[in-house]
Image: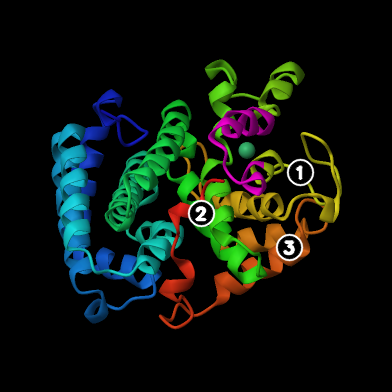
């Protein structure tokens, strides 16, 4: 069974037990406010959210139990059961989950104290995982044929293999995928679903990077850095036999190319970089900057946008940065996040 979250609470200093209990109390006390804030991040108010609000409330209560007992097996059960049940009954539109996955983590941070950093990290990852599972189950129920399901299982297995190796990527892949899809829609590319898929799989080549490099706390040596920089090529090679669309593979291959030609693996420049690669370059940086990690705090959305602005034209395609600015600043109305336009058609994944 896959271990969640990426930080194992049972391995922590026992002195942190008190902090966990306090966090559980804080969460329980603020449960309704957290659920409301999360939904607001998805562009919903409580009356419109209906069942989803009840789902989030029960989820937070379940997580409080997990924090009190250190029982992550229980956590797994809660997540699986809730995701499955809710997907069966599911009538919530996909855009809610998409929005919540991209921006929802920010909503919870306001309820955390600074010295909760490790617990907060674990909790946020878990909440993110919950919404992701819910979303995946919802999608899975929509799929028509066994062949379609097979494709999703292959893709999911690849993502899980990566996340098992590199906890940093847990939740990151789906956020990059969803943001890439939105950027693709905003830029008017022909197949935004392919931007989603390439975003989901962009770092899959990291399965070929040794643990000693992937998890090294200090700076990498030149030789180690060279190995790390091989992951776009490894990723493209892993994906080729699945016969995904060529622009998906090209996007994975190009996701570390810089607009001015200073990136890798090939140092290609400007519009010669496949558009999906340029899109993922921006989505990847934005999600990395705005996510809290054990070793550093997150930047605010404004701060991250400022960094992207400073480095546009050098690292990023200015058009893509402008598109992200519009997405971030857009009011999250139901109209603007049309469900139909965001549906992910799994049958478009392969050739
Ligand atoms: Fe990467």
How far apart are labels 1 and 3 at the CA level? 17 Å
Residue 302 visible from this viewpoint:
no
Judged from the image, the quadrant occupied by ligand 1 is top right
Instruction: Identify residue for label 3.
Output: 309
Residue 80 is situated, as x and y percent measured from the top left of the image, at 20, 44
Mark 1, mark 3: which one is toward the viewer? 1
The residue under the point 33% across, 54% down is 143
Tell whether 283 sits left or right of 250.
left
> Local crowd at mark 3 within 10 Å, few (<14), some, or many (≥20)?
some
Instruction: Identify residue for label 1.
Output: 257
The N terminus, quarter of image? top left
The kind of secondary structure element at disc 1 is loop
Lower position in the chain sequence, tag 3 or tag 2: 3
* 132 within the magenta span: no
Instruction: Identify residue for label 2.
Output: 348
Chain part drawn in magenta? 232-249
* 244 within the magenta span: yes
């Amino acid at each position: 069974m896959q271990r969640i979250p990426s930080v194992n609470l049972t391995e922590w200093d026992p002195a942190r037990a008190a902090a966990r209990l306090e966090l559980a109390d804080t969460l329980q006390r603020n449960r309704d406010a957290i659920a409301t804030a999360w939904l607001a991040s998805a562009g919903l108010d409580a009356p419109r959210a209906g069942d989803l609000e009840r789902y989030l409330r029960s989820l937070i209560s379940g997580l409080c139990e997990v924090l009190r007992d250190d029982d992550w097996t229980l956590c797994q059960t809660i997540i699986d059961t809730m995701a499955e049940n809710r997907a069966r009954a599911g009538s919530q539109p996909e855009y809610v989950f998409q929005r919540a996955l991209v921006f929802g983590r920010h909503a919870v941070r306001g309820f955390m104290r600074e010295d909760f950093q490790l617990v907060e990290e674990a909790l946020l990852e878990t909440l993110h995982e919950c919404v992701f599972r819910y979303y995946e189950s919802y999608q899975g129920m929509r799929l028509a044929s066994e062949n379609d399901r097979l494709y999703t299982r292959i893709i999911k297995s690849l993502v899980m293999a990566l996340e098992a190796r590199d906890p940093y990527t847990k939740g990151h892949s789906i956020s990059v995928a969803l943001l890439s899809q939105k950027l693709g829609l905003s830029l008017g590319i022909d197949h935004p679903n392919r931007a989603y898929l390439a975003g989901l799989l962009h770092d899959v080549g990291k399965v070929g990077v040794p643990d000693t490099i992937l998890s090294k706390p200090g700076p990498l040596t030149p030789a180690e850095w060279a190995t790390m920089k091989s992951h776009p090529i490894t990723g493209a090679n892993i994906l080729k036999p699945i016969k995904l669309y060529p622009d998906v593979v090209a996007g994975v291959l190009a996701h570390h190319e810089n607009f001015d030609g200073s990136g890798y693996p090939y140092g290609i420049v400007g519009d010669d970089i496949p558009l999906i690669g340029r899109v993922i370059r921006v989505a990847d940086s934005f999600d990395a900057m705005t996510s809290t990690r054990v070793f550093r705090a997150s930047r605010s959305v404004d701060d991250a946008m400022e960094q992207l602005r400073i480095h546009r034209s050098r690292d990023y395609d200015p058009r893509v940065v402008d598109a992200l600015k519009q997405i971030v600043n857009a009011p999250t109305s139901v109209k603007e996040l049309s469900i139909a336009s965001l549906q992910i058609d799994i049958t478009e994944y392969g050739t």
